[in-house]
Amino acid sequence: MPRPCPPRLSPRTVAPLVASALAAVVAAGCAGPPRTWAYACPRPGSTVTYDDGRTLSFARAAPDSPAVCIAEGPGGGEVRLIHAIIPESAIEGRGHAEGMAPLWPAKANNTANYRSVVRSEGSGIQYDFDANWRVVGFEMVQVPAGRFDAVVLERRWSQRSGGDLNAVIRYWIDTDAGIPVKRTVETIRGTTLMGPWQATRAVLPPPPPPPPRPPNM
């Protein structure tokens, strides 16, 4: 016997079926492309006060390295910060600007691994550290300065020689103005001079206007 043909569906019948199928896809967790964020130094004119007593007024990226952000610090002195979060100082060591490059553009689970050299300001002794970074993802974070849509970076810092320091440091960077708004420090082993901080006040200039659209040809 010939097989019976399937029943013809009218547009009125098809529409609910399509809607049901789309709802099932959404319920199954269909997601778009992963979110990314292109790093840039904080918007010039951004001023942030932190609960550790610092106030930083960000001015520009260093002309010799776009990874280094120049800000005016306490007392009006110039402060150079790698990716706005790591001061250029002996206690933080060298190698961060180049070593962190694989993190950008930031996307969840991007990693960067390198060795940094730290010099004791007192004795001048040098110590090697392994720095292992990961982009944790993006989240809304609440601090006294307000609520920010932030990218979260995790830094695992372990000492290779001359000590036994092992710590996990997390940073939250606002994805709009590029300002760092929070840091946490978890010491797993040893001791560190690094401490947590969060923004208590932020004054942000408006974003620059978009470039003009080309005239219609």
Image (cartoon, grey):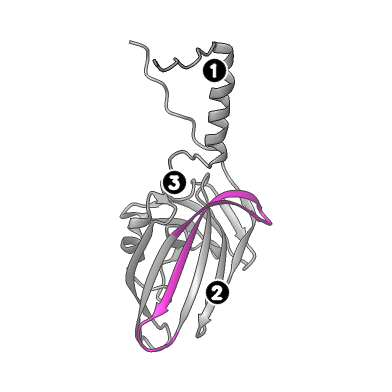
Horizontal and vertical percent position of residue 157? 43, 74
Residue tagged 1: 14
Using a 10 Å C-alpha cutoff, classify the residue at mark 1 as few (fewer than 14 neighbours), some (14 to 19) or many (20 or more): few
Residue 30 on the magenta span: no
Q: CA distance from mark 1 to mark 3?
A: 40 Å
Closer-to-camera residue (145/14) = 14
Closer-to-camera residue (192/212) = 192
Residue 175's place in the image compared with 194, above or below, is above
Mark 3 or mark 2, which is nearer the start of the sequence? 3
Using a 10 Å C-alpha cutoff, classify the residue at mark 3 as few (fewer than 14 neighbours), some (14 to 19) or many (20 or more): some
Residue tagged 3: 37
| SS category of the residue bearing label 2 | strand
Span of residues in magenta: 135-164
Q: For the stretch drawn in magenta, what is the main secondary structure? A: strand
Q: CA distance from mark 2 to mark 3?
A: 26 Å
> Which quadrant of the rendered structure holds the C terminus?
top left
**What amino acid is found at the position of numbered circle 1 in the picture?**
Val
* Left or right, 14 with reference to 214: right
Residue 216 appears in which quarter of the rendering? top left
Q: CA distance from mark 1 to mark 2?
A: 56 Å
Mark 2 or mark 1, which is nearer the start of the sequence? 1
> Which quadrant of the rendered structure holds the N terminus?
top left
Horizontal and vertical percent position of residue 75? 55, 64
| SS category of the residue bearing label 1 | helix
Disc tally is 3
Residue 106's place in the image compared with 125, above or below, is above
Residue tagged 2: 186
**What amino acid is found at the position of numbered circle 2 in the picture?**
Glu
